[in-house]
Structures are given as C-alpha cells and as structure tokens.
Amino acid sequence: MERDRVTTRGEDFSNAQVEVSQLPDYRSVPLSPVAAGYRPWALISQVSFWVILAIGLWILPRLPFATIDLVGWYALPIASLLLGLITAVYVAVDARVRGWALREHDLIYRYGIFWRKTVILPFARIQHVEAIQGPLERYFDLMRLKCFTAGGLSADLVVKGLDSASARRVRGFLLEQIAASGPTDGEEALEDDERG
C-alpha cells in the first residue's frame, strides 16, 4: 500500500483501492413519495391527449367537407382510447414508484417502471435551481424543481410531484448549499428564480 501514497509539494496524496463491497448502497436510502396530487395531475395531463385525439378522430369523418370513408374509420378512435387507458395505468403505477430524498450532500430522485432510473445529484454540481408551477400543478398544489449543472442548456434533474411548500423549502436549502460552496468557474451570483 506504500506505493499508493505519494508526497507532492509537501502534501500527502493517497489513491488506495476501494473495495466495492464497502461502498454505501444508495438503494438503502428511504425515499419520500411524491405528493398525493401528483397522480391526478399526471393522469389529467397525460390521458387528456388521447381522449382529445379520440374525439377528433370520431368527429373528423362526420364533417360535411370530409371525404373519408367511414368503413373501418371507427377503429382509430377506439385505438386512441385504448392507448389512453394504457397510459392511465402506466401513470398510476409510476406515481407509486416515484420518490425523492434530500441528504447532506446530494438530492436523489427515482422514477420509471420498466426502465427505473435513479438520479443522484451532488450539491457541489448544482449551479441553478428553478421552482416551476403550471396552472394544473397550481390547482393540485404541486411544483417541479429543475436543477441545472454547468455546461447544459436544459435541466440535469427535474423533480416532479413535490407539494409547493416542500418544493420551496428544498429549493431554499439547495440555494443555501450552493451559496455556501461559493462561486465556481467565474460564476459571480446565483439567480434566484421562481416561476409560477
């Protein structure tokens, strides 16, 4: 192990091997579920597209100027409604799987059913945080947090399904952590942005 230790400019540098079995398991962190309003919000926002499409496909061949033959055309609205039903089941199950946790040094967010994804974003990488709330989210008292890191145009992590009060508290905490770490790479000030 002596060959893993080097002294450079009076400082000891060590790069010893780490046993994989000794690493902490992020899966053992208890995640908080998304807010109760997330499921109805997701159902309305996702399923409404298929319902509107089915209505449009049902009305389209009945318009006076339409030259579409009605034979077999009825299958398209039914297919749209079936896709809406599949989407509704997916969204309902997905709402149970989603979870998040805030730890001392990072934010964890898990989502997905078939391809489950867990994102762990260290505070040291976060440069900007936005709290966003659309009209339907406002109705269900929900808010999304968008966390941006260096070099990207879009958010690296979007935490959906937080109730407004929790989202504001988490955002405030993240901004405090960013401010405490100081400006990085020429960054002078943090933008305090909340949309909604």
Image (cartoon, rainbow, N blue to C red):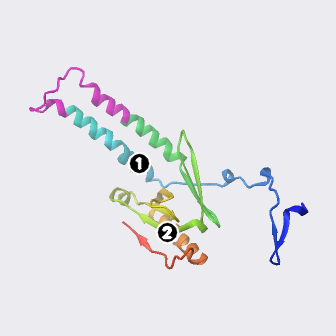
Position of residue 148 measured from the top left corner of the image (x, y, whole percent)? 50, 64
Task: Report helix, strand or loop for mark 1.
Answer: helix
Residue 116 drawn at (x, y percent): 57, 44
Name the disc covering residue 42, or none. 1
Residue 13 drawn above or below residue 64: below
- Occupied quadrant, residue 62: top left
Element on which disc 2 rests = strand
Residue 61 part of the magenta segment:
yes
> To which residue does mark 2 refer?
128
- The residue positioned 81% from the left and 53% from the top of the image is 19
3D distance between C-alphas at marks 2 and 1 = 26 Å
- In the picture as drawn, the residue positioned furthest to the left comes out as 64
Q: Is residue 47 magenta?
A: no
Label 2 or label 1, whichever comes before in sequence order: 1
- Of all residues, the one furthest to the front in this rendering is 9
Residue at point 44% right, 48% down?
39
- Could you tell whether 27 is left or right of 62 in the image? right
Q: Please name the amino acid that badge 1 sits on.
A: Ala
Q: Nearer the viewer, residue 104 or 129?
A: 129
Q: Disc 2 or disc 1, which is closer to the eye?
A: 2
Q: Is residue 109 above or below residue 72?
A: below
Q: Amino acid at mark 2?
A: His
Q: Which residue occupies the extreme right position in the image?
A: 2
Q: Quadrant of residue 84?
A: top left
Identify which residue is drawn at 63% across, 63% down: 103
Residue nearest the observer in this picture, 32 or 124: 124
| 95 left or right, relative to 8 | left
Q: What range is drawn magenta here?
A: 59-83
Q: Residue at x 48, y 57 (%)?
A: 158
Residue count near mark 1 (Cα–Cα under 10 Å), binned few <14, some 14–19, many ≥20: many
Mark sitting on residue 9 = none
Q: Nearer the viewer, residue 168 or 37?
A: 168
